[in-house]
Image: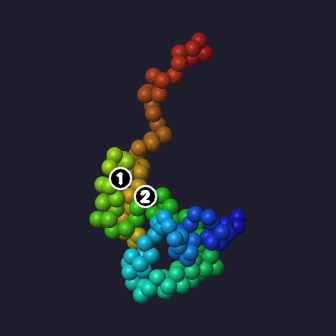
Amino acid sequence: MTRGHPLEWRESGYREIQYPPQRYRIVDLPVLANLLSVDSVSSLRHAHAAWVEEAMQADNTGREANWTESLAVGGEDFVASVKQRLGIGGRYREVISGGGDGHCLREGLGRYGPDFGREIQALRPKTSLN
């Protein structure tokens, strides 16, 4: 299955970095460049485009759960502050170690267990077929 180039995706980090909108930016490019030890936003764009092209050539384009299933990724203090700022929305979110990607803020894995056991029986209607 061909996924196409990230530039073709209307809403993507690739487009945000390569062609940042005038308003409603999500990525703080100067901060990102600093975090990646890149000397300028222009250098960041060039390096980012090269990283993406290299990944596509190597067919290394699969999803990375730390980035695609998390509300925030970064240092532990940053992720914890995002959770706090979410208020009640952060209630069932967990700060977990993301390995080499720092920490992630994700929805707790135990929140939606598939086994409801006897609890679901109370919700079933009583019929002559039961």
Q: Residue 113 at x, y = what percent?
A: 45, 41
Q: How is the image coloured?
A: rainbow
User: Is residue 128 in view from this perspective?
Assistant: yes
Q: Nearer the viewer, residue 35 or 76?
A: 35
Question: Are the two marked residues, 1 and 2, in contact with CB atoms closer than 8 angstroms?
Answer: yes
Badge 1 amino acid: Leu
Mark 2 burial class by Cα count in 10 Å: few <14, some 14-19, many 20+? some
Identify which residue is drawn at 39% across, 50% down: 108
User: Is residue 51 in view from this perspective?
Assistant: no
Q: Is residue 65 above or below residue 15?
A: above
Mark 1 or 2: in front is 1
Q: Residue 86: which numbered mark, if any? A: 1
Identify which residue is drawn at 57% across, 83% down: 50
Q: Residue 71 at x, y = what percent?
A: 43, 58
Q: Residue 71: which numbered mark, if any? A: 2
The residues tagged by marks 1 and 2 sit, at their Cα atoms, a distance apart of: 10 Å
Q: Nearer the viewer, residue 88 or 111?
A: 88
Identify which residue is drawn at 62% across, 76% down: 56
Q: Secondary structure at mark 1?
A: loop
Q: Residue 98 at x, y = what percent?
A: 39, 65
Q: Is residue 109 above or below residue 79?
A: above
Q: Nearer the viewer, residue 111 or 18?
A: 18
Q: Secondary structure at mark 2?
A: loop
Identify which residue is drawn at 34% across, 59% down: 82
Query: For this view, does 37 lie left or right of residue 121?
Result: left
Q: Residue 9 at x, y = what percent?
A: 63, 66
Badge 2 amino acid: Leu
